[in-house]
Amino acid sequence: MNETPFFFDGNGYRLFGVVHDPEVKGNSLGFVFCHPFAEEKLWTHRVFVNFARILTQKGYHVLRFDYMGNGDSEGNFSDSSVETCLSDIQSAIGWLKANRPIQSRLGLLGLRFGATLACMMAERALDLSQLVLWEPVINGTRYMKEMLRINLTTQSTVYKKVLYNTETLVSMMESGQSVNIDGYEVRWPLYHQTIGINLSDESKRFQGPVLIVQMNRKPDQGVGRMQPLADCYSNATVSIALDEPFWKEIHRNYARADNLYDRTIAWMDNR
Amino acid sequence: MKQVVSPIMFSNNNGRRLFGMLHEPDSKIKTTAILLLSPGVKSRVAPHRMYIKMAERFCSLGFAVLRMDPEGLGDSEGDFDEELIADVYASIQLGRHIEDTMAMMDWLEKKAGISRFILAGLCGGAITALLTAEKDPRVHAILALGIPCVMSSSTADPTKYITQSQFNSIRHKYLCKILNREAWVRFLSFKTDYKLLLKSIFQPFRRQIRVLKKTTPVNVAPTNRDIQINSNLNPHFHRAFYQFITKNKMLMIFSGADRLYWEFEEKYMAMYGPLITAYATNYSIYIVKEANHVFSFKEWQEEMLLHSVKWLSTIDG
């Protein structure tokens, strides 16, 4: 396999990445992968790795990397925010364009909150060629509520009661303290910038093709959940993949997400 | 002390490339290196980047620290065939990563001339450390966080091997919910685990009966057959643990609210305690009170790190 781990420059810190080069004759297409939030990143890591390997078999260049304060990149998670993540994605795009023969044919692929960030990035970097959004987090407020619930669950498991409710946790962040979510210290900038996100609230400037994959356990589950987001784009396709929510602890060992892969490859091949 | 962090890769004995990170102090490097071994499926980073915090702290003491992904995990090549995560955990508890851990030591020995190692890890990383030490004399000491002494299983009845402390915790949770409307809705709509509920309620009475019948623990090691019949203890655990602590140092840090601690106390120490007391100076157990399995809260992480550093300073490096 043609994979190289390395550090590259972020905004004053080193970002860790693995670049996957084509196993067959290159097609001058590339993807930067945008990973999910906090512990979801770890649960989904192998799904990303294996999909990157599949893409190299089809001639793509892929850069997987860790945002500042995540994975092996430098910095503390507590210093990260939506803006630092977007800046890091910009750095990753810059690196791949400068170091591989891709030019303007570069897309972003994101999963969960990584898909949210990819979507936001595409509004700033309009020269991206395509977007693949796997189960994007559409509403940041709702997502942060879910995340804070993890803290409440930890409290009730450990202390047998909730000492700090959601409102108190938010106040703590606002006053400069961090709040622990699954071991990650979240501060106000990350929280505040995330709750301001609602991906489906306005039409998008990005004109390239977009694949939005909704992941369902059952075929009839939440039909149309991603349609409001698709409606914001001029050229978006919604596809449903029957897969389990592998971004959290489940009984299955989810190193591959075959339905998700198939949907995505089919869309790429059709283009 | 400044440190240099570099990505590394090399091939294991199966010809699979393994990826990892090497933390090196920029001066006064010790002659013993530390390997942080993958916990379950969370790879070289570990939950909430715990291994990065540990590596930075240990490297500042002068240790070179290597964090690698074994075959099939993280960025490394290879695949796991197991469909269920419990079966992956079971394979690790039986030594899946021993060969790769030895390959990591080989690599460091070749690169830096280091031939003495402290193996450290959380959960699956801790049991990998112990099982590797049984096969490789280069392992000088072990730092085990939440070491599992039992076997995971995707087929066993999950209520069969629950410890007394787990039952107490579960019973307490049910009692707290007795006035909770949602809990009653779950109960009446058949969503409650009735078996677990009933077992947790009646377990204290059953225990009383068992205490009346029970004789004192024997001072000879139970056989593997005894273990298979009576508990879900890892059949390799006692042998590897006993062999290691007779000659080497080992620190076990447990989280106070973790079933793995209860299992160690109630399943291992209750049965084997008398056999290992002679070596009590070689191993120590430290409990981070209230902490959960992965030391989520930063005060728990800090306590774990401080105690680890204190113990490392007693190890000849």
Image (spheres, coloured by chain):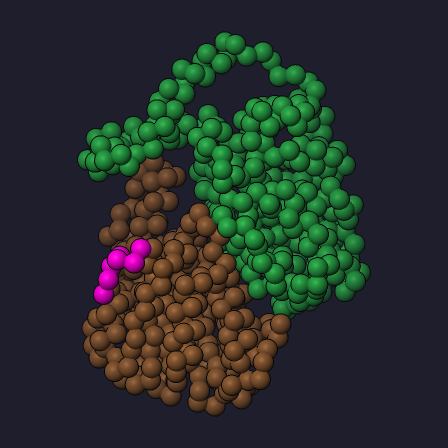
Chain colours: A brown, B green
Is A182 in front, or is A116?
A116
Quarter containing the C terminus of chain A: bottom left
Is B269 in front, or is B76?
B76
**A202 lies left or right of B277:** left
Count of residue discs: 0
Assess whether residue B270 is covered by the magenta stretch. no
Q: Residue at x 71, y 39 (%)?
A: B249
**A176 lies left or right of B239:** left
Quarter containing the N terminus of chain A: bottom right
Q: Position of residue A174 (x, y in %)?
A: 29, 60
Can residue B227 be seen here? The reply is: yes
Residue B22 sits in quarter: bottom right
Q: Residue at x 49, y 48 (%)?
A: B84
**B274 lies left or right of B156:** right
Q: Position of residue B179 (x, y in %)?
A: 21, 30
Position of residue A80 relative to residue A21, above or below, is: above
Is A102 in front, or is A82?
A102
**B301 lies left or right of B78:** left
Is B244 in front, or is A24?
A24
Residue at far bottom of view = A103
Q: Residue at x 33, y 82 (%)?
A: A209
Q: Position of residue B312 (x, y in %)?
A: 66, 47
Q: Position of residue B276 (x, y in %)?
A: 69, 27
Magenta-drawn segment: A218-224
Can residue B306 be seen here? The reply is: no
Residue A240 sits in quarter: bottom left
Magenta span: helix, strand or loop, mainly?
A: loop
Residue A162 sits in quarter: top left
Position of residue B39 relative to residue B178, above or below, is: below
Q: Residue at x 52, y 66 (%)?
A: A49
